[in-house]
Amino acid sequence: MHSKAHCPICERVNVVLTGGSDAVPQDTESGWCIAGTFAEIRQNRDCDVCQFVAEKLKDDQAKDAYEDQCAVRFWRWDAPDTSYLYSFGPVESDINCDTCDLDHHILTLVDLELADLNPDWIDLDRVRTWAKACDAGHAGTCHRLAEWASTPLPSLAPLLLVDVNAECLEEVPSDRLRDIQYIALSYVWGQLHGILETTMVNEHSLRQRRALASPPYLSHLPDTVRDAIELVKRLGIPYLWVDRLCIVQDDLDRKLPQLEQMGAIYANAYMTLVAADGADANHGLRGSCPGVANPRVRASPLLSFSPAGKSLVVEPNFAPRTGPGQWHRRGWTFQERTLSIRNLIFQDGRVFWECRGAVWTEELVYGPSPQPVPGSDKHVLEQNTDASQPIPRNQHVKPSAYNITLNRWPDLHAYEILVRAYSELLLSFPSDGLRAFTGIVHALSRSFPGGLLYGIPEYFFDYALLWAPYTPVHRRLVNGKLDPEFPSWSWVGWTGGGVNLSIAPVMHQSSGLSRAIVPWDKVELHPKIRWSKIDTGNGTCQAVSNGYYVAAKMRKDNLMTLPEGWSRVVTTRNGDAIEGFVHKDLPEHIFLWPLQISDSPLGRPAGSFQSQLHTRTSRAFLFLGTRLQPEWEEKVWSISANAVVPRASTFHLLDSHGGWAGILQSTGAEESPAISREIHECIVISGGLAWKDGDDELTSLQEYAQVDAIKSLPIYEFYNVLSIEWESGIAYRKAVGRVWKKVWERLDASDIDMILG
């Protein structure tokens, strides 16, 4: 796409690109200019490039819209490793617009060597080369993995797979899976009717050779599945796994084990095809297979700001949170891409490869490429090693939004990232609330002692119970009713927005000399009650482990004997020092506590448990006050709402005399309580304290920084509480909060035995 001849806006941009010094509003030494106001760019209808830029500046619905008078900068990034980037919009370090002080979308372009693309079809030789390069260079990262980094093969039941050469279903026993290669498909079903799926009635006929190519079935095969079968065949892989065909949809006895091992199916696939474009399964893998698939339409053309100027392309976004498609909004697809080690992703009319070792996209030359052998129709693998071409900043590893690291230690931070991402996604069937996260639960359970109880890690039970919504949430309903499989005390019992942990200290950091020291968070928890759970099989009562506190106490008591393999260390770097712990097998990490670490991956916890918790705790009544003023009024993008929404509110809690008592984190975004001085029944679930050292006034607790009664205290002691409501003798969580210990101990509190559902 070329600019219109003598377009004044593009001429200004070209001055920055070429380093010229025309008389335009700019700073050539800093590499920027004012391209024009947003209205000038938008109204320049004779220039295709300006029209494209104006549309792209409106692309990110999560950002504030440009106003007509906003001056739009065009600027070059000045860091050595990002000097190939140019952007329209506010300079990243300035964040907000010079004109209106709002936070606008930044359109970033890439000045790197561009590939010669076919506008209609993907170069499958290049796709094969990406796979071969990963096979050859990523051993120990993407395949041939160490025990801790791998996911066990599906073992609960045999797999039905599509034999792409025989065009039929074939059952493969679990003990054969290690010897075969299959590709999995991640896509959205959409609202299609009458599409082919395997049932008890047609399974036998679908196992017959060429069944999927026969007219009765082929006509009902959705385009995405049809294209995937052909693509897998052309890539030389014998089998495809696709849920609609490889799970017998109406055989519950066989379906449930397949859903249970879904994570293992994706984690052990040779690669996963991700159909991220389109609203349903009939969109197809466009551009994949001439003669079968439809041609593609690329969403991001090459841009040239002068007739003879260089071409740039929009910097690829490999993990968009907004856009017209449905794939990135679905809970099942999040698990599929996250657990798949290698993905070939169809997005915005182009294809890219992502794995734990690299990201390669077809519009850029960067990465391995097939080179023809003279006098032959064969190709050899060649890696682009041009030192003058930097590694694009977002192509080092799989995007963090879909990257699960299977660590040997129980990683609370990794858990929180995964829960935060998953909790705001959509499910067609609310009953899948935990099932669509089960593969991730199993992966985390390999290093979390006690596993996860309804999505809550037992080892960090006190911390994980303090989940709080950052956008509004409501109770998850199944068929319009509350379901005991989704307890109120777990985040899986709620839906509609995202959640995170309200207190989640950094548990570890790198011990490498090149990394700066990060001070440990100045907040800690300690148990105040014992939780018990009931085994559904034999009815016995068992304690929830809550084992973090054994490790936490060792930080304070130097006389306690450390677990085998652990030692205390003091690390000093650039004048900063921290005390921590190092494990002999993990010398590259410093830990806050000597966590419980197993020599080999933990198995799944035995038995299953009711969703109700039993405890004895302290109860008191408090009143809801005004809204706690956040540090800044911020609206955030909600994937579930597909819109910008306000953050969930936090309110002050007051005692009966109107004195400040604590805070309560609401599940909604209301500006003021619906009822003046609404009474809340609160129960203690753990204790905590935060502190300040010397001039260090930083704190992660908002009330400690704002409330006059406590902000000058060197130590702020509090109780973590749940606001509860009762139904048929069972208590249910309404909200989570903190109450100043000094206030709680002078309240008319009483001890109660209770069941929390």
Image (cartoon, grey):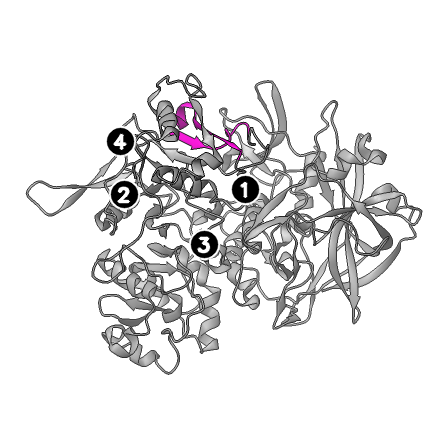
Residue range in magenta is 69-94
Quarter of the rendering containing residue 294:
bottom left
SS of the residue under disc 4: loop
Identify the mark at residue 63; answer none if there is no mark: 1
Q: Are marks 4 and 1 in contact (CB under 8 Å)?
A: no
Residue extending farthest to the left is: 375
Q: Earlier in the sequence, mark 3 or mark 1?
A: 1
Query: What residue lies at 22% left-to-right and 70% top-to-bottom?
Result: 166
Q: Position of residue 391 (x, y in %)?
A: 35, 32
Q: Earlier in the sequence, mark 3 or mark 2?
A: 2
Please name the residue that numbered disc 4 is placed on: 307
- Between disc 3 and disc 4, the foreground one is 4
Q: Earlier in the sequence, mark 4 or mark 1?
A: 1
The crowd level at tag 2 (other Cα within 10 Å; few <14, some 14-19, many 20+) is: some
Specify whether 244 is left or right of 113.
right
Q: Position of residue 308 (x, y in %)?
A: 25, 29
- Between disc 3 and disc 2, the foreground one is 3
Q: Amino acid at mark 2?
A: Ala
Identify the mark at residue 133; answer none if there is no mark: 2
Please name the residue that numbered disc 3 is placed on: 324
